[in-house]
Image (cartoon, grey):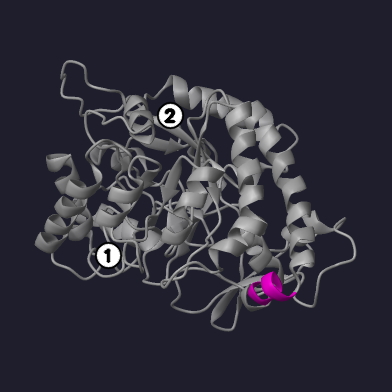
Amino acid sequence: MTEQSSNSDTSGAAGAMTSRERVLSAIEHREPDRVPLDLGATPSSGISAIAYTRLADYLGVEESRTRVYDVVQELAQPEDWAIDRFGVDVLDIGRMFNNRESDWYPVELSDGSQAYYPAWFHPEQEGTALIAKAGDGTPIAKKPKGATFFDQTYFPYIDGYPDSYDDLPDAMNKVLWQAMVHSPWDHAGEDDYWEQLRNAAIKLKENSDRALMIVAGSNLFEWGTFLRRMDNFLMDIYTEPDKVEGLLDALMEVHLAGLEKVCETVGDVADVLRFGDDLGLDTGPFMAPEIYRKIFKPRHTRLCEYVHKNSGMKTFLHSCGSVYKLIPDLVEAGYDVLNPVQTNTVDMEPERLKKEFGGDICFWGGGADTREVLNSGTAEQVRDHVKKRLDVFMPGGGFVFNTVHNIMPDVPPENIVAMYETVAQYR
């Protein structure tokens, strides 16, 4: 991926907004000229490589090449044809990296279709599975035969918390989410990385009127689960809170140092910075709200405050699950945007969210249920479903259209087309 032309489909209308204006207007709760739309600006608002290949085939896009930019989740980098065809309003700065033919090599996906992996990623075949290893040879992730993503298999602190966190960066580099990270961060070890990142962001902004996203992560709860394993860390929160907070303080040092560089480099160019921290199950938050307020909220607040004070970027939180009980705290912590808006979980009904929080936080997602409707409904059911979601979320701004998390491999291409056509006709 290289440069993007200006967003089309303004139809020459007087006073039509640019995509950047449209996205920022929605985040600031000012109703834009039409609802903005995202596809692929983050690794939680994209499309699986298999679904993308089938979509391109269905539409007869012969020049399409499925590049798997996020190898953990096996997500495709949307190409210019998809960005333009569906009227996408926001772009990930990372798409400006890995744009040479030599940056990719062909692979076969689990359904037999062809795609391309980044040149730096070479998992090893062991039996029927693919195994990914860290730089020192430690096996860290596994993709079983027929699977469409890699599972974490190595947890650096599974046997307990260390006496010192001097080795924390090394431990983090043995977790798949960092060792197998997507662009632009797969270039972070290069001497001129920050210069590359700034130049890429400026070039993209000069050649596009779309809003720009930088994905920064800075997870806290999730890093605890990545390092200790989910079951251990959930127990630790209640049984060893001092050790948990010690780990979180060490993580905050790493994250704030990273945010300092991001804000210095692209804080005046990018429009939105994406944080991540999955806080919810289908049935509610992973922890009682009072635990969140004591342990995590103060640190999330510091992260948001840093970005707001040191850049012009809006703050975007990706958190799966039912986080209804935490939304007031997320607003107070300083998040401008909530994604993926998992409306198929407890207490997360669209009408309820819009009524109670529609003026407080921008909902980026929730536009189509990827668990039960988009994947298994008819095209007509998808259209009706999307219209209802737009009716709820669009009024007054505060909404960017996206599916509930990524478009998964089992979603039929005709349903994807029906979804985007409905948005185009109805937005």
Residue 193 seen by the camera: no
Q: Residue furthest top?
A: 14
> Quadrant location of residue 228?
bottom right
Query: In the image, is 42 to the left or to the right of 252?
Result: left
For the residue carrying disc 1, how many other residues have a C-alpha within 10 Å: few (<14), some (14-19), or many (20+)? many
The residue beneath circle 2 is 3
Give the label on residue 411, or none: 1
Q: Which residues are magenta?
A: 234-239
Q: Residue furthest bottom?
A: 127
The mark closer to the camera, 2 or 1, is 1
Do the CB atoms of the residues marked 2 and 1 lie less than 8 Å apart?
A: no
Point out residue 399 in the picture as x, y percentages from the top left corner: 31, 42
Mark 2 or mark 1: whose residue is earlier in sequence:
2
User: In which quadrant is the N terminus drawn?
Assistant: top left
| Helix, strand or loop for disc 2 | loop
Is residue 59 magenta-colored?
A: no
Out of 322 and 137, give the one closest to the viewer. Answer: 322
In the rendered view, tell whether residue 204 sits above or below residue 162.
above
> Quadrant location of residue 413?
bottom left
Is residue 236 magenta-colored?
A: yes
Instruction: Identify the residue at image location x=79%, y=65%.
Output: 242
Most common secondary structure along the magenta stretch: helix
Out of 6 and 402, give the one closest to the viewer. Answer: 402
In the rendered view, tell whether residue 235 sits above or below residue 329.
below
Q: Amino acid at mark 2?
A: Glu
Out of 4 and 371, give the one closest to the viewer. Answer: 371
